[in-house]
Image: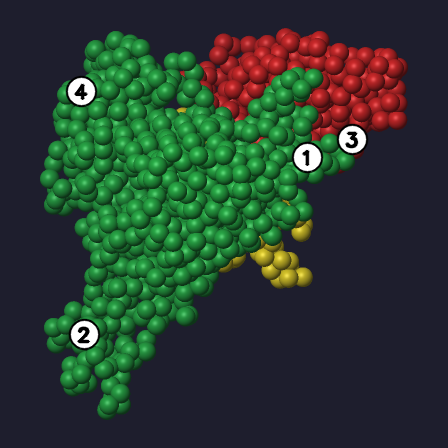
Chain colours: A red, B yellow, C green
Amino acid sequence: MQIAQYTKAQSLTEAWELHQKRHSVILGGCCWLRLSPQRMIQHAIDLSALGLDTIEETDGEFRIGAMTSLRSLEVSAALECCTDGALKEALRHIVGVQFRNMATIGGSICGRFGFSDVITLLLALDADVVLYKGGRMKLEAFAATGAGTDVLTHVILSKAGRGTAYASLRLNATDFPIIACAVSGSAEAVRCAIGARPSRAVVLRAVRQDAAAQGPAKMARQWADAVSYGSNMRGSAEYRRDMAEVLCRRLLERVMGADV
Amino acid sequence: MMNIAYLLNGKKEKSDIEPGMMLLDFLRSKGCHSVKCGCETTNCGLCTVWLNEKPVLSCAILAARIDGQRVTTLEGMQEEARELALYMGREGAEQCGFCNPGFVMNVLAMVREVTDPTDNEINEYLSGNLCRCTGYASHLRALHAFIKAKGAVDV
Amino acid sequence: MKEINRSVMKKDAVSLVTGKPVYTEDIAPEDCLVVKALRSPHAHAIVKRVQTKTAAGVPGIVCIITSEDVPQKRFTIAGQTYPELSPYDRLILDPHIRYVGDPVALVAGTDVAAVDRALRMIRVEYEVLKPLLDVRDARDNTVIVHSEEDWKSLVNVGGDNKRNIVAQSGEDWGDVEGELDRAEIVIDRTYHTKQVQQSMMETFRSYSYLDAYGRLVVVSSTQVPFHIRRIVATALDIPKSQVRVIKPRIGGGFGAKQSAVMEVYPSFITKLTGRPAMMIYSREESMTVSSPRHEAYVHIKLGADRDGMIRVISLESLWNAGAYGDHSPTTVTLSGHKSIPLYNQYKAFRFNYEALYTNTIAAGAYRGYGAPQGIFALESAVNELAAELHMDPVTLRLKNILHQGEKMPAYFNETALSCHLEQCLLRVRDMIGWDRKYPRQVLSNGHIRSVGLSLAMQGSSISNVDVASATIKVNDDGFYSLSIGATDMGTGCDTILAQIAAECLQCSVDNIVTYGVDTDISPYDSGSYASSTTYLTGKAVEKTCHTLIKRMKARAAAALQCHHTELLEFDGTTITDPDSGHCVSLRDLANGAMCTNEIALEATEAHFSPTSPPPYMAGAAEIEVDPETGHIDLIDFAAVVDCGTVINPALARVQVEGGIVQGIGMALTEDVILDPKGRIQNNSFMQYRLPCRMDMGTIRVEFAPSYEPNGPFGAKSIGEVVINTSGPAIADAVYNATGIRFTELPITAEKVYMALKHKDCKTQ
């Protein structure tokens, strides 16, 4: 990997302007930069001087800077409480503490990796993202398009009353997930994300009453069947489908608790 | 080339570097030979150093990122490492030693962050540090003894 | 005993934990040329043309080597004692490409960037050939991996390169077919284990330079310095006197570094250019062009009576050598020799084997050296027999296992002089709570707890082959320096051997300095492999001490004017003449020896062993299976080991724990998957999953020491036996939990789940 020019941006405007050039890259945690030895980056843009590494809490939401490390999210008591521990569960398997000190939420989201635990959970939580030019939008919409030449600055997580749970299956504790599922339920609706299919996570929804009427087993089967799966070294499509059903059912049981 | 200014093991330094240079290679070139490369894919933890007192993987951080920051390697933590060595040595838990520097840096970060960690907490905090020799059990024995002794001194 | 059976801290512990620069790369000269290899993407091909001209023009490139530039003498990279049993089937660079990653060219330059750039600019024209990827098809296949005329086997091990055969042989003892006919029950099953990677944390690396005498000095992270000297000299076609090999601290080996995986490349560059050169394998190279465990298909036929007496064991091993024959003729023999003797009450046994070439990574030596494949098969079959008989596997074993004093027909007719196998089994049964937990318990959450167990054995050195020696000198003030040719690869032999010397010389371990290894200085040792160091080099140290004490007494006799040297008494600090009461201190003796003296206060002794006394082990696993996902959680692993006298309990315990966890990796997560073109998909720690500390339950270790009369202070080996029980014990626990018998490792959650799903389908 080669970098021709490295700029620690002094403003978002500068970062955005640099990012309009060809072969420019916004650096996140850089965790996997080294995995592409042939890669030639003309402009590497570093956002670390822009104060985007904080978690701000207001009455209604969390505003998380794109450069916030996964470790900061993991140890945030407020986020742990708000997600019923699901965020911690989604993060604690990711490689190791050192890695999570480096990896950023912005990098995790912009990478739009299929195996991403972070995106899977945030999709279930119906998070928003904020782009420098594009403004605020749903993560679900962003996940389909990516940042393009825009700059992701924040992730916004609403505090809306809900229950959340996360589960994944892995070959061993620190591996990529074979399948990852997250479910969150409010009084009105239940929302589920299935990731590591192995391609990008997808969102499924149900009205709470319907989900309760159907019961977790039926609901989970319906969701698992609604999604397509692929095979790779970590698992076959068939195994993934079946596991999506098992995990969704277990998560639904946890989230819906007394309803069922 | 670009110029960076940083604190390395408490010493102010400046260097000219290629912008694509990784911190691991940079630190070794600065004579910090404790920093080891084990995997190239961020999975082994051998290259763990501290960036502003937080453990990170130097194989995956651009050296450019340390501009204006504090970097600590095991060379800068010798006193504590020697203490830990007695407990590791008693259990034979150092074995081949190649994973030790990264492991020790993460252990020293852990004891600053987590008080009286349980087996589970230790295993979780250090899960990014692979070791092929020991099977990890001796690490737990050594660390509990080390933490206990440290606690006794601190009190 | 003062120093034996004591947990002495390793002499290098503080240096290692504090991160001192003691490894190969840390101490290399700064001006080393960077050496890298251009590798074939094809599994089977002929290199037609290599265009290097543009690449050679890259600033900083010093030379580019292709197959035309290297000596045309074949060699093996297997680090083994004379007479070498592995075929001479390699060249430094060979136009015939035999697996993905076989080197096509070597590039040497002043910096990494230049070398990487040059590598990208070399153009290679290949004639791509059909690869042979499945060892089951290898014998007499039309694809011939080694068609060369100069293929050479120094010893006849049944090899025939034109038929893809590296080695083959067989042995019947007793009436095998008759006993199989008479047996009331026969278990007939084939077991498959894959090419597991040693995955030591320090990848392969070596640097070389010419010294003041113009000799080639090779500094290498190796387990076998003396074999590296021979291999490098042979490959470079230079006299062995022109090569010196030095081993610094090693970041783990586990057998991987019992092969000269890459030493010949930088050595050749140094010889050619006269400049220091270093090669450091990337993790990817260490996973794809290295020396993993042999893939094996082991076919077992186990004949028994209804009362549980095993009448006959037939074990037939098919060994995937891969592209080259390194360690194939030898590892394959252990699959039978280190498994069948466990059940010594048979009336007949058969052990047949064949090792065949394919166009896959060449396998080599890995902890256990063939025994894990054989033991996984045999132990699994014994567990299956127990299930068929509805008999507790412990009971079945107690009826059939080997006991001390018995002659072992399947082990070269050696007698088991030290064997606490039964004690190991009984104790491990209690430790794991077998009687309460066998076979399974269903928990309230639907998960299933179960237990499984296995026995194991190994050897201690290669009998009648391996040679170990030690030199001890008395120095100023009476401190001793111990020179060994055995290589400490983190295991602690520098310390353990000093403990043995300290015990003999009645001094503290701190009074003994250990040095190893420099082939110019150190006494000869076959190397640290085959579970030989404590047992064999330990005995050499013991012998050396006795000789040294004699010499010290001779010197003391002169000083004390005593004529009965043999009557003098040495107590570690003084030598006393009991008749006169006169004495001389060790300090005075040592310092006096540096003035007007003609008795050298040093000794060297060599040792070999006519027997290879097996260490034994019983291992039991407790697991928890989630039947809905197939996920296996390891709860507990209990192990009891008979390694004879335990010289250093702390280091022995870590050996056991480390071996068990490597075995767990092989059982549960470590998988090598080839794509249809023969490329290894699990080529990094991201894709090849070593156990991490969150995966482990508790591991509990105890010892049941017998006393081996041929070992130093009764010791046997420990390094290898400890990897053997994890696979079969876990596989049996999975069976006890699910009713499904897995005959292939690793056992992943998906395999368990799918098997359960299909079983349910069948029963419905």
Q: Tag 3, which chain?
A: A
- Mark 2 vs mark 1: give the one in front: 1
- Mark 2 vs mark 4: give the one in front: 4
Residue under pointer 1:
C448
- Mark 3 vs mark 4: give the one in front: 4
At label 1, which amino acid type do we have? Ile
Residue under pointer 2:
C593
Instruction: Identify the image quadrant of the C terminus of chain C.
Output: top right
User: Is residue C612 at least partly visible in the picture?
Assistant: yes
Q: Tag 1, which chain?
A: C
How far separated are the C-alphas under marks 1 and 3?
Answer: 28 Å
At label 3, which amino acid type do we have? Asp
**Do the residues at pointers 1 and 4 share their chain?**
yes
- Residue drawn where x is 23% and y is 91% of the image: C580
Outermost residue, bottom direction? C580
Q: Which mark is residue C148?
A: 4
Residue B76 position within the rendered picture, expressed as x and y whole percent measured from the top left: 48, 48
Residue A203 position within the rendered picture, expressed as x and y whole percent measured from the top left: 72, 13
- Residue drawn where x is 22% and y is 23% of the image: C161
Would residue C46 be found to the left or right of residue A255 on screen?
left
How far separated are the C-alphas under marks 3 and 4?
Answer: 67 Å
Q: Disc 3 on helix, strand or loop?
A: loop
Residue under pointer 3:
A84
Which is nearer the N-term, disc 2 or disc 1? 1
